[in-house]
Amino acid sequence: HTSDTGRAKMLAELFFNSLAREWLDGTLLAVAAEIRAQCLADLPDASGAAERAYQQAFVERNWDEVIEYVLDVNAYLHKIFSSLFEDRKVAITRVQRPQIAAQLGGFFDALNSAFSRWGREGRRRKLSDFQTFLRGLAAETLAAHKPESHAAWPILSERFPVVADFDVAEPSHFAHEFSLQLAALLGKEPVEDWVAQKLEAALQLQQAQVWALIKGCSAICPCCGSKCDRTDKHTAHRCSHHLLPAFNGWRVAGTCEAALDACRSSKNHEAPKRSDYSDHLFPNLQEYLQAEHPEWLPFPKEDRELLADSVLKAAWVNCRAPLLARYDMVDSTPPEWIQAYEESQRKLPVTAVDAAEARLIQFGYQPDA
């Protein structure tokens, strides 16, 4: 029965590949696509993602996250996205992964059972007889309108390997050899383990693709450090939420006081700006940008005296200690800001920058050398 043995092994390997690779890959792709769709519902595009970062840190008064935002808004957004993706992944895979593993295991059990039933007749047959037998089981299942009770038969019928029809000398021996080879293939690693491994690989690929869709432009405002949120192809940057320059370490020339005039204000436009690359002092924002950051021109300007809004005032008051220390700034915070917004139990300690840096490292943040 050498020919039966060899062909049984070949068919077992083909069926194994059809189910454990092709069917499983397609099924896991659908799971990954579901997670992708949920993430994109929350963060539909780069502009929405940038808005989410600002809202979550500043508007929701998450002071630790404000520090992450101003240290590196792109790394912070990557952190938000990764957390969101992980939450969706855990919620879906906790249910889906064991179900898929059980379903796949059920397919192999059903395949063995079908071969065993087919092989009991004993007489010489053709492989196409077994395919016809499977199609009959699938048709019965569909006709009974209860696919959940024998869901394997239609799948096994659809996934029957493309192979030349051949004679089976002893169906019972063929079925036995098929079963042994399938068991050997399945015995190399538990079904649950390689379902988990393949699902993780599919999700990592999907996560990278979604992040590429929503990360957007990585440019940050040279003055306040907020993220460019343009989603079109562009050479000139802009952002919807400019901050106070002090959040990005800007100091008043001559006094080293924290620069607390709003980024778009006339005062900030008129204030001298030190070069990023030397001790040269530009007389105003326009000349600084023209020389070193022309891609941020034209820069928005408010004609009237622009005062910081309550969101930025509250964030500065409660995050100022670590930022003053980090950038060696003199505290010039107006007393009325402190009185109105300071949260004595929640304001950040000087060590908050180091802690934020540690949290952001895995998301692409690179501390200053």
Image (spheres, helix red, strand yellow):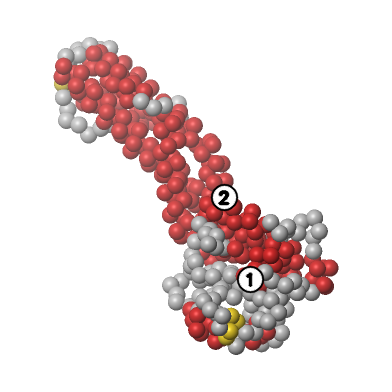
**Residue density around tag 2, few if under 14, some if 14–19, many if 20 or more, within 10 Å:** few
Whole-percent x, y for residue 13 in the image: 27, 28
Residue at (61, 59) in percent of width and height: 68
Mark earlier in primary sequence (2, 1): 2
Q: Secondary structure at mark 1?
A: loop
Residue at (30, 18) in percent of width and height: 180
* CB under 8 Å between discs 2 and 1: no
Residue at (22, 11) in percent of width and height: 122
Residue type, numbered disc 1: Gly
Q: Nearer the viewer, residue 205 or 133?
A: 205
Residue type, numbered disc 2: Ser
- Which residue is the site of mark 1? 249
- Which residue is the site of mark 2? 83
Q: Quick check: can you spot residue 224?
A: yes
Task: Give the vertical position of 266 relative to 135 (above or below).
Answer: below
Frontmost of labels 2 and 1 is 1
